[in-house]
């Protein structure tokens, strides 16, 4: 797949994002800093991902005069993290759009097949009227992302964006081929998956590093 030729895939080039991802990769980065970095990257990526939110003009009165000025239109935004690591990116997006609703999708990975299994799904209602941003720091095999989007579609969600910090080519290709109509935002595209389906060079288990578990 030629990622640069796919208009629905955006791989971030901003120096701040690149710098913060390097700090994430470092195995000496502790839980507190790691958690803060994930939130900051979520905000920086969210700024880009939300650049096409629909707008409408409303009348406001400034200290000088009345004028028409734009605000976000419609039912706005829903942020849906894939549990549990996706939670780490939510606050960064909410800092940008505090009125956004938050849903949750719980998936766990089979240690042998590496395929995801659903255990929880709770989405804002009505989901079909919102722009939906699905967050997960790691896009590895693409199985969890595809299953999460399938669930959202089954509940009526239509306009979906997927946002990850690190992606493997295998997962990015699978997601883009399965759902060619969604917008995908990637902080960094890494080299490959290893035999255990971990991204290389990656940053380890994002959930464990965010929440300080092993």
Image (spheres, helix red, strand yellow):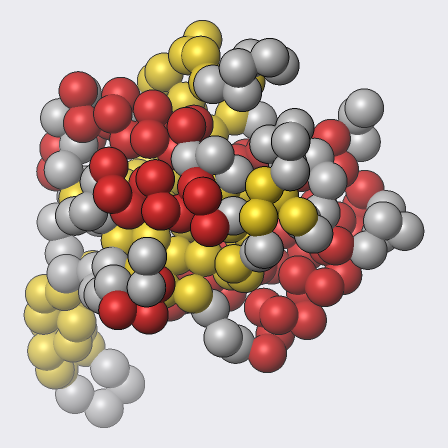
Q: In this view, does 197 lie to the left or right of 2?
A: right
The image shows residue 188 at horizontal and vertical percentages of 54, 61
Residue lying at the far bottom of the rendered structure: 64
**Quadrant in which residue 47 is drawn:** bottom left
Query: Does residue 58 appear in the picture of this structure?
Result: no
Q: What residue do we see at 60% from left, 12% from top?
A: 112
Quarter of the image with the N terminus is: bottom left
- Compared to 92, does 80 lie above or below? above
Q: What residue do we see at 14% from left, 65% from top?
A: 55
The image shows residue 93 at horizontal and vertical percentages of 45, 52
- Count all numbered tags in the image, as a single digit: 0
The image shows residue 89 at horizontal and vertical percentages of 54, 45
Q: Is residue 209 left or right of residue 58?
A: right
- Compared to 36, does 22 lie above or below? below
Q: What residue do we see at 52% from left, 58% from top?
A: 189
Residue lying at the far right of the rendered structure: 28
Query: Does residue 166 appear in the picture of this structure?
Result: yes
Q: In this view, does 8 lie to the left or right of 201?
A: left
Residue lying at the far top of the rendered structure: 119
Q: Is residue 106 left or right of residue 32?
A: left
- Compared to 44, does 119 lie above or below? above
**Quadrant in which residue 196 is drawn:** top right
Depth order, front residue of 182/34: 182
Depth order, front residue of 71/14: 14
Q: What residue do we see at 58% from left, 55% from top?
A: 191
**Quadrant in which residue 31 is drawn:** top right
Depth order, front residue of 157/205: 205
The image shows residue 146 at horizontal and vertical percentages of 33, 31
Quarter of the image with the C terminus is: top right
């Amino acid at each position: 797949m030629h990622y640069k030729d796919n208009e629905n895939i955006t791989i971030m080039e901003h120096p701040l994002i690149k710098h913060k991802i390097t700090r994430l990769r470092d195995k000496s980065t502790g839980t507190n800093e790691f958690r803060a970095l994930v939130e900051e990257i979520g905000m920086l990526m969210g700024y880009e991902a939300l650049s096409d939110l629909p707008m409408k003009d409303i009348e406001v009165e400034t200290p000088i005069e009345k004028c028409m000025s734009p605000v976000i239109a419609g039912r706005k935004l829903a942020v849906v993290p894939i549990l549990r690591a996706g939670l780490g990116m939510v606050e960064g997006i909410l800092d940008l759009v505090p009125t956004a609703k938050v849903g949750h999708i719980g998936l766990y990975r089979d240690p042998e097949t590496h395929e995801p299994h659903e255990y929880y799904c709770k989405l804002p209602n009505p989901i079909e009227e919102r722009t939906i941003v699905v967050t997960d720091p790691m896009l590895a095999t693409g199985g969890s992302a595809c299953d999460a989007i399938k669930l959202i579609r089954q509940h009526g969600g239509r306009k979906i964006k997927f946002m990850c910090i690190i992606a493997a080519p295998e997962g990015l290709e699978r997601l883009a081929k399965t759902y060619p109509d969604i917008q995908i935002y990637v902080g960094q595209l890494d080299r490959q998956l290893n035999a255990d389906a971990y991204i290389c060079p990656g940053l380890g288990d994002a959930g464990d590093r965010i929440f300080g578990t092993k």
